[in-house]
């Protein structure tokens, strides 16, 4: 009866919201220009004029990745699976700095379009923030906990293209589980005969994670949110979400009835999982974007996890795809310096090449893509780029968050709370997820790790070991980052014991900590306007990475989108008398005839963060 009453409150709030938000039909906006660039005269070397329009999207395919339509466009999966659908007449020599997801996805499309692509990665392995590797004992180490939401349309398309989607992903029950101190569970249970938005409404109404007063407050606040408006006026709702980037989720949530109890017990764990910061600091736009997707797409809240490690299940198939098409991937070879031409005013207007590796070998290219994360691009950009173009200077206004990824292996099944004998039993073959406990992503409001999972259950292909139990992987945010590795491991074990009291009888038999001082860009209010587009004011210099401008969050899907978008932009600009190839040939001819080249300042970069 109580559940029915709360569900009614949600529906009544939604109905009231629909009345309040009823507006005339609006015109759908594809995207809004974010250019704020400087006009620079042409130079003999560049043979072109840099204008504010140079960063505007030239590719129709790239335009489909932004704006309100992109959230509803399931055809993006088919585009990612099928490739660019075009082979350029001209063959460009393209250098990509960074072999994370963004860089590798861009390389796939550019190779399929007929270009000569070479990649340079500082680390000895690919993957960027999604990378993994093996230690000397064969343990697979990761830099984060990687979960695939059902709305990762572009990334799923890439995985279909490389043949890994059907074999390397494990779908989970359609439920988001919260583990509270003492072992009590709460959930957002989306399993319902009717899909979105009804499945979402009943999940919030029925959750055990909130007390009745908080449920009612939650219902009233969500009922007057842009999410509800989007159910009948998607453009209007999405435009409201975009306008909320300058306030925190807490500020938005408490404006019209939301209370602290809901924030502390449910929304904070979700915020930490999305961006590693709490509701008092995360942008309202960030939080409402993901829940907008949950509201309009039933599959958006369905979770998948890899069969094994990211290297084996995600990256290796991409590397084979690239190798089959002649793409050279250089690992342990980072970019040390960008080499560029300048115009008569001394402003950079063309990249001629990059210096790579310890010997700073010069590699010349028709076009260069920097597919790095925020700390990486900050370290590789010359000062002259910042001084000449606000677009590059804005990147330095983006902040990042530190995280520590902890792996702890036990001699039993930590999340098995119903049967102590089962918890202790690691005998025989318990592969393929047959171990005891919860096979899903987990959240907690009572721990310092934003989200966690037992990889021996969720991704058993390479994380289950016969005769051993749980491999808990948990991501600590900046609250714990400065502690020693030993202390973080002990804190992880202690907090797991509080969440799963029966696990106190288990012993830790192996552990590992990976600290990443600068991971995702910090999704605090006001950051979205600083994200750069993929095309830049320098005609043959491009950017990729999940921090660059695309409507999704800093995530695997965001990185994939940016890689597809940058490839589309290069393909759209490659051919013709004003294309990248023609401009490269003219610039080389001008240089041969006596044009002066100015190299970037002598930037020595002993290390910069990995690719995006």
Image: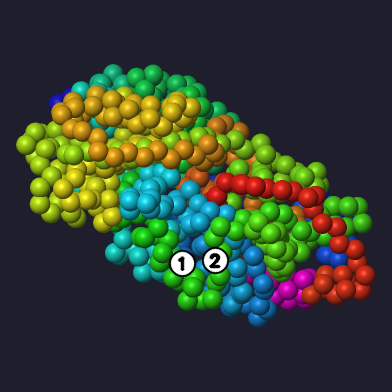
At 34% from the left edge and 26% from the top edge, which residue is drawn?
491
At 31% from the left edge and 61% from the top edge, which residue is drawn?
168
User: Compared to 223, does 350 lie above or below?
Assistant: below
User: Compared to 136, does 453 lie above or below?
Assistant: above
Q: Where is residue 15 in the image (x, y as percent from the top left)?
A: 35, 34
- Other residues around mark 1 within 10 Å, as few (<14) / some (14–19) / many (≥20): many
Q: How is the image coloured?
A: rainbow
- The residue singled out by tag 1 in the image is 319
Question: Residue most toward the bottom?
Answer: 89
Residue 82, disc: none
At 66% from the left edge and 44% from the top edge, which residue is drawn?
378
Q: Hey, which quadrant is residue 368 in on the image?
A: bottom right
The boundaries of the magenta stretch are: 570-584
Q: Where is residue 355 in the image (x, y as percent from the top left)?
A: 71, 59
Verify CB contact (< 8 Å) between mark 2 and mark 1.
Answer: yes
Q: Could you tell me which quadrant the N terminus lies in?
A: top left
Q: Hey, which quadrant is residue 199 in on the image?
A: top left
Residue 605 lies in the magenta stretch: no
Q: SS class of the residue under badge 2?
A: strand
At 80% from the left edge and 50% from the top edge, which residue is drawn?
601
Q: Which of marks 2 and 1 is nearer the N terminus?
A: 1
- The residue singled out by tag 2 in the image is 329
């Amino acid at each position: 009866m109580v559940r029915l009453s709360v569900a009614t409150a949600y529906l009544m709030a939604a109905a009231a919201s629909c009345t309040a938000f009823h507006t005339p039909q609006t015109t759908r906006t594809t995207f809004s220009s974010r250019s704020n660039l400087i006009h620079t005269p042409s130079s003999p070397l560049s043979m072109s004029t840099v204008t504010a329009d140079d960063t505007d999207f030239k590719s129709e395919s790239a335009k489909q990745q932004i704006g309100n339509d992109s959230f509803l466009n399931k055809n993006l999966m088919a585009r990612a699976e099928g490739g660019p659908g075009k082979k350029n007449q001209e063959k460009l020599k393209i250098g990509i700095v960074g072999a994370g997801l963004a860089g590798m996805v861009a390389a796939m499309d550019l190779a399929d379009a007929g270009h000569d692509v070479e990649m340079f990665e500082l680390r000895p392995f690919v993957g960027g923030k999604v990378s993994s590797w093996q230690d000397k004992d064969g343990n697979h180490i990761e830099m984060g906990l990687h979960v695939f939401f059902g709305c990762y349309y572009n990334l799923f398309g890439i995985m279909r293209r490389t043949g890994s989607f059907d074999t390397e992903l494990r779908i989970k029950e359609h439920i988001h589980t919260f583990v509270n101190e003492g072992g009590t569970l709460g959930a957002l249970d989306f399993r319902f005969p009717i899909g979105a938005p009804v499945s979402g409404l009943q999940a919030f109404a029925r959750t055990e994670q909130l007390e009745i007063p908080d449920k009612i407050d939650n219902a009233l606040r969500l009922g007057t949110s842009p999410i509800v408006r989007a159910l009948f006026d998607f453009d209007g709702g999405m435009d409201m979400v975009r306008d909320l980037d300058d306030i925190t989720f807490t500020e938005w949530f408490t404006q019209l009835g939301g209370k602290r109890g809901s924030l502390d017990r449910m929304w904070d764990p979700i915020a930490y999982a999305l961006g590693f910061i709490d509701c008092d600091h995360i942008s309202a736009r960030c939080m409402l974007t993901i829940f907008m997707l949950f509201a309009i797409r039933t599959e958006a809240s369905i979770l998948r996890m890899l069969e094994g490690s990211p290297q084996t299940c995600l990256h290796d198939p991409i590397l084979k795809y690239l190798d089959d098409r002649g793409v050279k991937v250089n690992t342990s070879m980072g970019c040390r310096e960008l080499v560029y031409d300048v115009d008569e005013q001394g402003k950079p207007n063309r990249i001629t090449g990059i210096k790579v590796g310890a010997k700073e070998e010069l590699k010349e290219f028709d076009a260069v893509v920097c597919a790095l994360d925020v700390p990486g691009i900050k370290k590789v950009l010359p000062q002259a780029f910042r001084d000449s173009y606000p677009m590059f200077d804005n990147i330095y206004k983006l902040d990042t968050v530190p995280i520590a990824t902890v792996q702890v292996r036990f001699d039993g099944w930590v999340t098995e709370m119903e049967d102590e004998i089962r918890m202790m039993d690691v005998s025989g073959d318990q592969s393929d997820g047959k171990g005891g406990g919860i096979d899903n992503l987990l959240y907690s409001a009572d721990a310092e790790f934003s989200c966690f999972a037992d990889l021996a259950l969720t991704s058993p292909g390479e994380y289950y070991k016969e005769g051993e139990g749980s491999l808990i992987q948990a991501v600590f945010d900046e609250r714990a980052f400065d502690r020693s590795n030993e202390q973080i491991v002990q804190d992880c074990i202690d907090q797991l014991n509080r969440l799963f009291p029966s696990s106190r009888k288990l012993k830790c038999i192996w552990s590992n900590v990976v600290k990443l001082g600068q991971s995702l860009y910090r999704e605090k209010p006001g950051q979205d306007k600083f994200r750069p587009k993929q095309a830049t004011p320098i005609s043959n210099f491009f950017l990729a990475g999940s921090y660059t401008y695309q409507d999704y969050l800093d995530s695997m899907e965001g990185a994939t989108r940016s890689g597809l978008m940058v490839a589309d932009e290069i393909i759209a600009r490659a051919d013709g008398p004003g294309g990248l190839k023609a401009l490269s040939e003219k610039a080389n001819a001008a240089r041969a005839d006596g044009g002066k080249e100015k190299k970037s300042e002598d930037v020595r970069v002993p290390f910069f963060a990995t690719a995006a």
